Image (spheres, rainbow, N blue to C red):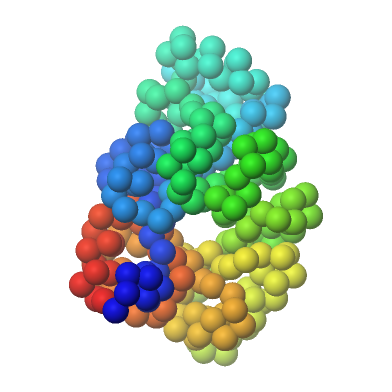
Amino acid sequence: MSSSTAFLQRPLITAHTGCEGTVENSLVSIVTGIEAGADAVEVDVRATADGFGVLLHDPEIRLKGGECVPVGKLSLDDLRRIERSGQGASNGENEPAVLLDDALALARDHNVIINLDVKDDPSVSAVVRAVEDFELTEQVVISGCSRARAAAVTAFHPGLRVLLNTASVDAGVDDRGYRRFLMQTYHDAVGAGCCGINIDYRMCRDSLVRFAHQRFLPVSVWTVNTVEEMAHMAKLGVFAITTYKPRLLLRVLAQAA
């Protein structure tokens, strides 16, 4: 069996931000994911008031006094001033927020796919602008998108690949209810011009994967961290698996080959 054939028989591995015990949304996390053998690395993106993309998960910066300040109301200089003064901590860590530009430059230099999890609507324009400036359309996948947000991204930049993040569905829903869910998900993805579906692995069933596969729409799952669930998702035939443990997933997939 050729290496290319083996590659096609396993899901792609996306290293979740903060993989392998690193600080979330840090450059170290990106490098660690790459060194672990991941096919893609994921980061969270928000925009400052003056339109700069920054790697942050939470919508607010909590100051030491307990006050919470929305990221979207801070300029980049404001954010850096807060960080330099030690008055705020992003994501519970005393780490300065990383510029999206720096993350994109790292992905470009390592020739790795970067999954930009867009956390709010105002961040869309910042993400699209940065990707265009770096000419990285072919190395970027956008996630974190409802149908409306996905449609906004594809309208703004039709060449960008966007994953539809599914709505939730009750884990105990019967087959008929799940069928309605998968049909709605499929039509939302196609209607918004998405290149695939991004779903919580706990809501992913064989029927969804088969239905989407037969319509040339890949299914990616998040966030899978146990051997049992990694093996199960691979057996379902999902296209990509996001995990905090890319090294473990690589071993699981190698053993299943």
Q: Residue at x 39, y 41 (%)?
A: 30
Q: Residue furthest bottom?
A: 176
Q: Can residue 24 be seen in this snapshot?
A: yes
Q: Residue at x 27, y 42 (%)?
A: 21
Q: Quadrant of the N terminus?
A: bottom left
Query: Which residue is more in the foreground, 244 or 88?
Result: 244
The image quarter in which residue 77 lies: top right
Q: Can residue 229 be seen in this snapshot?
A: no
Is 126 displayed left or right of 36 in the figure?
right
Query: Which residue is more in the foreground, 195 or 150?
Result: 195
Q: Residue furthest top?
A: 85
Q: Quadrant of the C terminus?
A: bottom left
Residue 224 in percent (x, y) is at 35, 62
Residue 255 in percent (x, y) is at 20, 72
Is 101 displayed left or right of 65 in the figure?
right
Above-or-below relation of 172 to 94:
below
* Image mark count: 0
Residue 67 in percent (x, y) is at 53, 22
Is 111 displayed left or right of 243 in the figure?
right
Q: Residue at x 59, y 79 (%)?
A: 216
Above-or-below relation of 238 to 101:
below
